[in-house]
Image (cartoon, rainbow, N blue to C red):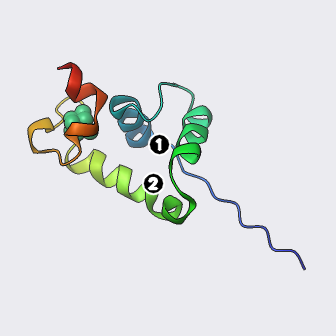
């Protein structure tokens, strides 16, 4: 029996916003953003990627009021570099 493990990242509103702000993807379509993330994130981190991005979006990179000064990844963020 052949077991095929399919890895993916659920691109919800948090993942989409953060991916665009940081610069992980410049796409708007969730499937294209997912493909960009799959190309960037090593396989061993994929199972946690959605949780990490959603957690960051709920606690630090909050829509409309991101806490950029307290953000631990601000030096890697395209949005932060622009503002
Ligand atoms: S620096 Fe600001 S915009 Fe960039 S990921 Fe952090 S909170 Fe979000």
Q: Are marks 2 and 1 in contact (CB under 8 Å)?
A: yes
User: Would you place residue 47 above or below residue 56 in this image?
Assistant: below
In the displayed structure image, the side of residue 73 where residue 23 appears, left or right? right
User: Would you place residue 67 above or below residue 80 in this image?
Assistant: below
Residue ID at (28%, 34%): 77
Residue 62 visible in the picture: no
In the displayed structure image, the side of residue 36 where residue 75 appears, left or right? left
Residue under label 2, please give it.
Answer: 50
Residue ID at (20%, 46%): 60
Instruction: Give me the disc on residue 12.
Output: 1
Residue 65 percent coordinates (x, y):
16, 32
In the displayed structure image, the side of residue 56 where residue 6 appears, left or right? right
Depth-wise, is mark 2 or mark 1 nearer the camera? Answer: 2
Residue ID at (61%, 53%): 8
Q: Which image quarter is the N terminus in?
A: bottom right
When asked about the image quadrant of residue 52, the answer is: bottom left
Residue 18 percent coordinates (x, y):
35, 37
Question: Farthest residue toward the bottom?
Answer: 1
Circle 1 SS class: loop
Q: Residues within 10 Å of mark 2 (few under 14, many from 20)?
A: some
Instruction: Give me the disc on residue 67.
Output: none
Q: Nearer the viewer, residue 6 or 62?
A: 6
Residue 32 percent coordinates (x, y):
60, 32
Residue ID at (47%, 25%): 26
Ligand 1 in which quarter: top left
Earlier along the polypeptide chain: callout 2 or callout 1? 1
Q: Is label 1 within 8 A of ligand 1 (CB to nearest ligand atom)?
A: no
């Amino acid at each position: 029996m052949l077991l095929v493990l399919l890895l993916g990242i659920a691109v919800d509103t948090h993942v989409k916003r953060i991916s665009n702000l940081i610069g992980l993807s410049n796409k708007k379509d969730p499937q294209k953003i997912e493909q960009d993330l799959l190309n960037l994130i090593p396989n061993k981190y994929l199972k946690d990627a959605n949780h990490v991005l959603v957690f960051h979006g709920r606690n630090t990179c909050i829509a409309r009021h991101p806490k950029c000064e307290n953000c631990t990844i601000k030096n890697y963020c395209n949005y932060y570099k622009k503002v």
